[in-house]
Amino acid sequence: MKSSESAESETQGPPESPVFVTTSWSVVVLAKEKDSPEAARALEQLCRAYWFPLYAHVRRLGRSPADAEDLIQSFFARLLEKDWLAVADRERGRFRSFLLGSLKHFLANEWDKARALKRGGHVRWVSLDAPVGEDRLQHEPVAKGSPDREFDRRWALTLLDAVLGRLEKEYMQAGKAKLFGQLKLSLGSDRAEVNYTQLAGELAMSEGAVRVAVHRLRQHYRELLRDEIAQTVATASEVEDELRQLFQALAG
C-alpha cells in the first residue's frame, strides 16, 4: 500500500489545464472578412463538435437514417462554402440558435436545390468525420419531446460529453488515468452519495485525501463546462444563462 504522503500527493487536484482557447463563436461573429481563415476554422470545429444534435433533430422530424445523414452533410457543405458570415451576427445570439435556425432555413429553401447539385456533381462535400448517428441513437432512450426540444437535449448531452473528454485527457496526460477512472462517477452523484471509504480503499488513499480529490475534480469540471459553453456564445455575459438552459434541457 502507498504511504499516506505519496498517496495524498495524487490529490493535488486536476493536472494544470492548458490556456483556454479563444471563444470559437466569438471568432466567427466578430470576423470582419467573410473569408477569414480563423473564423472558417472556428466554425468548422463547432460544426464537427455539434453534428449529432442536428442529426437527432432531423430523425425526430421523421427522416430516414440515410436521408438524415445525407441532409446534414449537404447542410454543412452549404454552410461552410457559402456566405455564412453574412448571417452569423450578434443578433443570431448563441451558436446553438444559429445552427438550428440555419438548418430550418436549409430544409425550407435549400434542400431540393442541394440534392439537384449533388446529382449533377457540383457540390464539394465537406468531411466532418462525424460518428455514425444511427448507431448512437439506437443505444439511447427513445425521445419523447418535440424535434426542437430533442435538439436542445442532445446539444446538452454532447456538450457534457465534450467536457468529460477534455477532463479525462488532462488526467491521462498527467498519468492519473486510474484516479480519474475511479472518481469520475462522483460527477453524477450528490456529495452524500459518494462512498469515500470505498474509494479510499480502492485507491490506497486516506479518506480525507479522496474528499479533496473529488472536490477538486468537481470544481475543475465546472470550470471546463463554462469554458465549453463560452465557445458557443458570443459574449461572456451569456454563459450563465446558457448553463441554466442546458440543465433545463436535460431535465426535460
Image (spheres, rainbow, N blue to C red):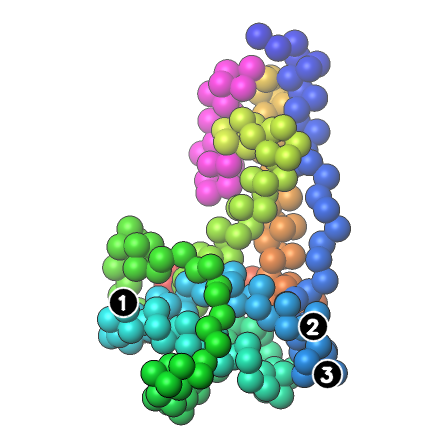
The residue depicted at 63 percent of the width and 39 percent of the height is: 170
The residue depicted at 64 percent of the width and 68 percent of the height is: 41
Inspect the image, locate mark 1, and give the three-letter code of the amino acid beneath it: Pro
* Mark 3 surroundings within 10 Å by alpha-carbon count, few (fewer than 14), some (14 through 19), many (20 or more): few
In the picture, residue 137 is in which quadrant?
A: bottom left
Q: Distance of mark 1 from mark 3, alpha carbons?
A: 37 Å
Q: Which residues are magenta?
A: 184-204
Inspect the image, locate mark 3, and give the three-letter code of the amino acid beneath it: Glu
Residue 204: x percent and y percent? 56, 15
Count of numbered marks: 3
The residue depicted at 59 percent of the width and 40 percent of the height is: 169
Q: Is residue 160 magenta?
A: no
Determine the secondary structure under disc 2.
helix
Q: Distance of mark 2 from mark 3, alpha carbons?
A: 9 Å
Query: Circle 2 is placed at which residue position?
Result: 37
Inspect the image, locate mark 2, and give the three-letter code of the amino acid beneath it: Pro
The residue depicted at 41 percent of the width and 63 percent of the height is: 52
Residue 50: x percent and y percent? 49, 64
Q: Quadrant of the C terminus?
A: bottom left
Query: Circle 3 is placed at which residue position?
Result: 33
Q: Is residue 76 left or right of residue 115?
A: right
Determine the secondary structure under disc 3.
loop
Query: Circle 1 is placed at which residue position?
Result: 65
- Residue 100 visible: no
Q: Quadrant of the N terminus?
A: top right
Q: Is residue 196 magenta?
A: yes
* Mark 1 surroundings within 10 Å by alpha-carbon count, few (fewer than 14), some (14 through 19), many (20 or more): some
Say above or below: 237 vs 93. Answer: above
